[in-house]
Amino acid sequence: MRMSRGQMTFYPMRIGDNVFIGTGTHVSALSISSHVHVGANCVLSPFCVVKESCKILPDTVVPPHMVIPPGSVVAGRPARVIGEVGEGWGQGGGGEGEEYVEGGDLRALVRSIK
């Protein structure tokens, strides 16, 4: 929802299963898929899309219309992909596979964005 000059505009939003959203986070995203962890004090701008099994680190600002690829770790202001989550991350109850890998298979994609 967005308010300006007495008007309210509602944005369509879809949030999947097993999604954690940290305290102080502002969400205006178009879609957040399943098994996503959003850290504290983040901003998910209007019409951004977060795909499956992603981790958004604290204090990240995701710009409007950004699409975060599946299995990505995102950080920064503005947000950028900094790595990928470990295999099976977010699927279980914790423990095995909960860390993320710096770079990994997304290294070439990250370099092409810069």
Image (cartoon, helix red, strand yellow):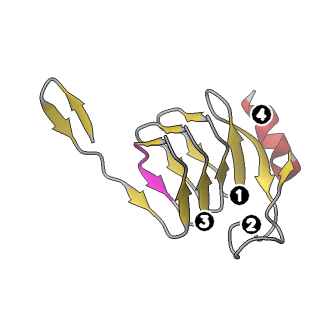
Q: In the rendered structure, which amino acid carries the disc numbered 2?
A: Trp
Q: Which of 44 and 23 is in front in this view?
A: 23
**Residue at mark 1 to residue at mark 2: CA–CA distance:** 8 Å
Where does the magenta region start and end?
28-32
Q: Residue furthest bottom?
A: 92
Q: Is residue 29 magenta?
A: yes
Q: Is residue 54 left or right of residue 45?
A: right
**Residue at mark 2 to residue at mark 4: CA–CA distance:** 25 Å
Of circles 1 and 3, which is in front?
3
At horizontal 55% and vertical 37% (from top left) the residue drawn is 41
Residue labelled with disc 4: 112
Query: Is mark 3 in CB contact (under 8 Å) with mark 2?
Result: yes
- The answer to which of marks 3 and 4 sits earlier in the sequence is 3
Give SS at disc 2: loop
Q: In the rendered structure, which amino acid carries the disc numbered 1?
A: Gly
- Disc number at residue 71? 1
At horizontal 74% and vertical 71% (from top left) the residue drawn is 94
**Residue at mark 1 to residue at mark 3: CA–CA distance:** 10 Å
Query: Is mark 1 in CB contact (under 8 Å) with mark 2?
Result: yes
